Amino acid sequence: MKGVFAAIVLASFPLIAGPAESAKADQLFRRADYEGVIRTLAEADRRDAYAQVLIGKSFFSLGEFKKSSEAFERAVEANPNSALSHHWLGKAYGRRAETSNPLFAPGLASKARQQFEKAVELDPKDVEAIDDLFSYYLEAPGFLGGGLDKAQALAERIKTLDPVEYHYALAQIAERRKDMRGAEEHFRAAVDLAPRQVGRIIDLAKFVSHQGRILESDMIFEQAAKINPNEPRLLFERASNLIRGKRNLPEARALLQRYVGMPLSPDDAPRDEALKLMKEAGD
């Protein structure tokens, strides 16, 4: 979403904010200057769905999930048929559920599911929205609308849209069912279909590490590093893997220091999580 985000939302939403403010906000967002985006659009009309989406994604990236959800609520109100707005409102509710008082978490989680389902209803080919709904079904208990059967059914919808993501989904389901051989087969199938996708290689490395095959995991991480050594997720996951195994903590700290100094997207792990890991590593 980094490079094409502005083009997508421009095509989806009518602009109310002045062209100068919109152009400046676009540039700031692409540079990951999220506070700058918020300042630039502080006086934007509540009916300007495009501006509210930019504000919502910026607050999301800063870890201000309540303010993020409020901005996406305004975006949905302004343009109720936007799958993108519903999807990101669901993401904001989901993060609030993860970080809020446990008394409020179930209600927020249910709101997240409803928004994901609405996004998929509005755009049945939006793989990112389907992925987030799949993750919800996979992780949430039945009383909150989750369940492996729902996840399995949704995975079949991914099959024709993105075969690589389909195998990744099946790998996660197999893990939940304690079918580790099947899970590994699907993780490897995803890598075979997309050998240059660093994310798929990282997924396999993490799985192998969790099986206790540390040296093999390190080799797979090295494979990902040869493709893109500056991929933020690679830095974060490799450091996390080292810290979890209590190995080579100086290298882990160095990786995390690089990570926190990079421009991160809303899909990357928050800097706060990286800083917590650095403390675990003895920083």
Image (cartoon, rainbow, N blue to C red):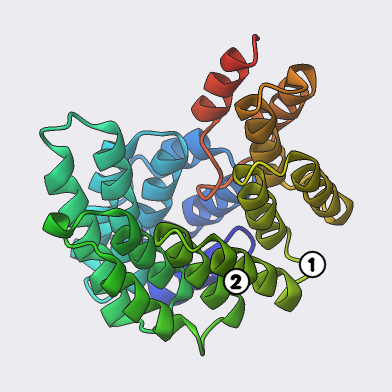
Q: Nearer the viewer, residue 242 or 162?
A: 242
Total numbered labels placed on residues in the image:
2
Q: Nearer the viewer, residue 281 or 44?
A: 281
Q: x, y percentage for residue 48? A: 31, 60
* Amino acid at dot 2: His
123 to 16, vertically: above or below: below
* Amino acid at dot 1: Arg
Q: x, y percentage for residue 18? A: 43, 57
Q: Earlier in the sequence, mark 1 or mark 2?
A: 2
Can residue 16 be seen here? The reply is no
Does 250 sit left or right of 90 as displayed?
right
Q: Quadrant of the N terminus?
A: bottom right
The residue at which mark 1 appears reads as 196
Secondary structure under tag 2 reads helix
Q: Locate residue 51: give its quadrant.
A: bottom left
Q: Tell me the crowding category of disc 2: few under 14, some 14 to 19, or many 20 or more residues within 10 angstroms, Cα based.
A: many
Which residue is rendered at x = 55% and y = 69% of the image? 182
